[in-house]
DNA sequence: ATTTTCTCCTGCATGC
DNA sequence: TGCATGCAGGAGAAAA
């Protein structure tokens, strides 16, 4: 499931293969994604040159100089750069065909992903305008102090709080659970009832977990693969996620799972308070 | 204003 | 073996 490390891994994989290249056309085999793929995408993109590939949260931004393609991988999306004549599989929904014979191919079985186009500054786009800070940026916007301030008066569980992209981007269920374990915080605790000191630990834990995951190419549980089709390896490092009933790697207590908001929360009742 | 629930979708695991 | 059921979850939209 693409969270920030998987999206960043994808970005690093595709960027050098796309930047400086000119787009020949686009092929849309399935336009029903999270939102409809814009009509006339082929005409819109034809002839444009890709200047850069960047990321904002879990969104990938392909800059063509006078317009941006906004991509989201949703739950099951993956991107590869492959020869344009490679036969398409059933879930290969969109190709961005390059003039050099390669294409950027989006595969997304569950179709929660998105392909959008904007001619405005992407940061102004409705979906990006109200996003929280980047946890790995060094601009100082993301910190324990920030989380502490934003959480005052909030009753929701801290796990849900840090998964809210309007609070901080890029943290999905896997890394939320892992960061909370690393910080020693019970994921069910109310966000507004956690001290400044503990939020310092949590902010640091989020950065460390995301950085470590990027280093090994992200987490592959079912279907994530990078731009070359290779899986990530962070799943070998997971301390609590998906480990219900197994022994905590730190204290040996049994890792618990409870369902909250239709999502599994994994934690060690001994290490996390 | 904040929080919770619903919704989109398919593949895979489970159970009768 | 086959079918029904449930679960996974990013995140906007709607409901509470």
Image (cartoon, coloured by chain):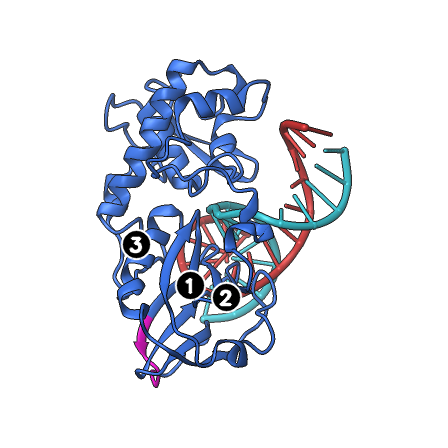
Chain colours: A blue, B red, C cyan
Whether the residues at callouts 1 and 2 have beta carbons within 8 Å, the answer is no
Q: Which segment is the magenta one?
A: A81-86
Q: Secondary structure at mark 1?
A: strand
Q: Residue at x 30, y 54 (%)?
A: A9
Give how far across and how far down residue A218 sits, in percent. Answer: 29, 49
Of A15 and A253, which appears nearest the observer? A15
Q: Is residue A198 above or below residue A61?
A: above
Q: Which is in the foreground here, disc 2 or disc 3?
A: 2
Residue lying farthest to the bottom in this orientation: A85
For marks 2 and 3, give the CA distance. 23 Å
Disc ID at residue A62: 1
Q: Are marks 3 and 1 on the same chain?
A: yes
N-terminal-most mark, 2 or 3: 3
Q: Is residue A71 above or below residue A27?
A: above
**Residue named by callout 2:** A67
Residue A8 in sight: yes
Chain letter of disc 2 in the image: A
Disc ID at residue A9: 3
Give how far across and how far down residue A15 sits, in percent. Answer: 31, 63
Say if the magenta span includes residue A247. no
Classify 10 Å Cα crowding around label 1: few (below 14), some (14-19), many (20 and above). Answer: many
Of A105 and A244, which appears nearest the observer? A105
């Amino acid at each position: 499931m693409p969270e920030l490390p998987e999206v960043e891994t994808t970005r690093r994989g595709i960027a050098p293969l796309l930047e400086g290249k000119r787009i020949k056309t686009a092929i849309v085999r399935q336009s029903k994604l999270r939102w409809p793929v814009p009509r006339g995408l082929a005409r819109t993109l034809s002839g444009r040159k890709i200047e850069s590939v960047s990321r904002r949260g879990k969104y990938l931004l392909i800059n063509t100089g006078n317009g941006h393609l906004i991509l989201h991988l949703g739950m099951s999306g993956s991107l590869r750069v492959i020869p344009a004549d490679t036969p398409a599989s059933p879930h290969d929904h969109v190709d961005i065909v390059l003039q050099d014979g390669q294409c950027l191919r989006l595969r997304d079985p569950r179709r929660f992903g998105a392909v959008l186009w904007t001619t405005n500054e992407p940061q102004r786009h409705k979906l990006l305008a109200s996003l929280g800070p980047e946890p790995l940026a060094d601009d100082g916007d993301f910190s324990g102090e920030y989380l502490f301030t934003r959480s005052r008066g909030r009753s929701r569980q801290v796990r849900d709080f840090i998964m809210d992209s309007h609070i901080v981007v890029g943290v999905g269920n896997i890394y939320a659970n892992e960061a909370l374990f690393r910080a020693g915080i019970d994921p069910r605790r109310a966000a507004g009832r956690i001290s400044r000191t503990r939020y310092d630990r949590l902010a640091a834990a989020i950065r460390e977990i995301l950085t470590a995951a990027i280093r090994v190419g992200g987490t592959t549980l079912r279907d994530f693969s990078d731009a070359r089709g290779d899986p990530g390896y962070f799943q070998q490092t997971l301390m609590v996620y998906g480990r219900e009933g197994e022994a905590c790697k730190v204290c040996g207590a049994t890792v618990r799972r409870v369902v909250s908001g239709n999502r599994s929360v994994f934690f060690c009742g001994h290490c996390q308070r």
